Amino acid sequence: MDLFQLGGYGLSSRLILGTGKFSSTRAMIDAVRSSGTQLVTVALRRFNRDQAEDDLFGPLSEIKGLTLMPNTSGAATAKEAVRAAHISRELSGSLFVKVEIHPNPLHLMPDPIETYEASRVLASEGFLVMPYIPADPVLAKRLEDVGCASVMPLGSAIGSGQGLSTAGMVSIIIRESGIPVIIDAGLRSPSEACAAMEMGCDAVLVNSAVAVARDPAAMAGAFARAVDAGRQARIAGIMPKSGTAVATSPLTSFLGTP
Amino acid sequence: MIRIELNGQPREIPDGSSITDLLAIDGADRRQVAVVVNELVIRPDDRSAHILRKGDQVDVLVFAGGG
């Protein structure tokens, strides 16, 4: 079986789902189930007794085989991200952490310096660190060197739906990387997720494209099938491109005059 | 009564209250929460013995949706 090996886990799904922006907890849970994912991201938030539905731990813990990956969203520095990871570990019971440090809401681009530092510290503490990063092969390699479980370069800006605009650099990261490469952010449609997998990504992380769909559960299922198709195509071997036509039928004339 | 800061807001609680008592007031005791007092994470087993003091900064956190 083609398991996705990630930090000692063997996952049958290569689709990681974010849980933000859904219209309701029910819609989110239905999408998670429909996606078949075994890993979802969650965010820390202060408890508010008037918004008890915000608490996702209970509903998510009812889904068998699901592991939580808390993110460090809201952190603007490495120190804040490390603190968020420590608090989240108490809640999640999992060592996964998505290091996410983006100080500017205009573009939400990850801060590479703070991300590197937080990842280095958390990896040394035994966390399974999944850093959200710009599509930078140098940074990706440095994060591998400090013991990250994967790298998660962005396809395009978070929530933008601009797709895999970083494909060129992501290809280089894939070629160079000794750890899983996961496209995180910007994917809009299943075909883009499929393309990412065909390129050789090990998994994709999707949130907005599913959460804001008219039917999130159906979209989650579509993404799951696209990710699987892309993975299968990658394994099967995608034909090389040719600058000229290459005939698929014999060109020997048999209808023409002898 | 003593005054503490709960999730960034001032809050009056009975003198001698433990973290477990505080969580029960808001119904947070029925949920999976993380508790941080003055930047220190307090684990569930230690919450009933941890008596809050005047001026303590308490954060009670849950998992919400996030990408």
Image (spheres, rainbow, N blue to C red):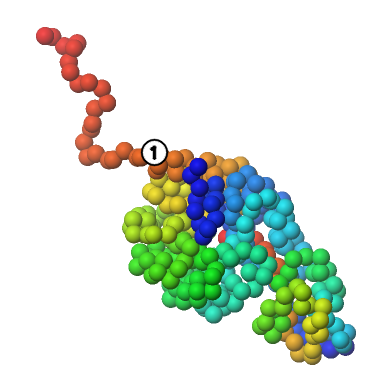
Location of residue A244 in the rendering, given as x and y in whole percent from the top left corner:
21, 36
Q: In this view, which residue lies farthest toward the top?
A: A258
Q: Within 10 angstroms of label 1, few (less than 14), some, or many (20 or more) residues?
A: few
Query: Which SS class for mark 1?
Result: helix
Chain of the residue under label 1: A
What residue sits 47% from the left and 66% below the top?
A: A148
Q: Quadrant of residue A257?
A: top left
Residue closest to the eye, A145 or B22: A145
* Extreme residue in the bottom direction: B54
Relative vertical location of residue A51 with respect to residue B7 in this rendering, above or below? above
| Residue at 55%, 42% in the rendered image | A222
Image side of residue A186 versus residue A174, left or right: right
In the rendered image of this protein, does residue B2 appear above or below residue A83? below
Task: Give the x, y percent position of residue A243.
Answer: 22, 40
**Residue A198's image quarter?**
top left
Point out the image quarter for the C terminus of chain B.
bottom right
Left or right of B4, for residue A142: left
What residue is shown at x 55% (from left), y 47% (from top)?
A12
Report if residue A160 is visible in the image: no
The quadrant the N terminus of chain B occupies is: bottom right
Q: Which residue is mark 1?
A: A236
Horizontally, residue A64 falls left or right of residue A3, namely: right
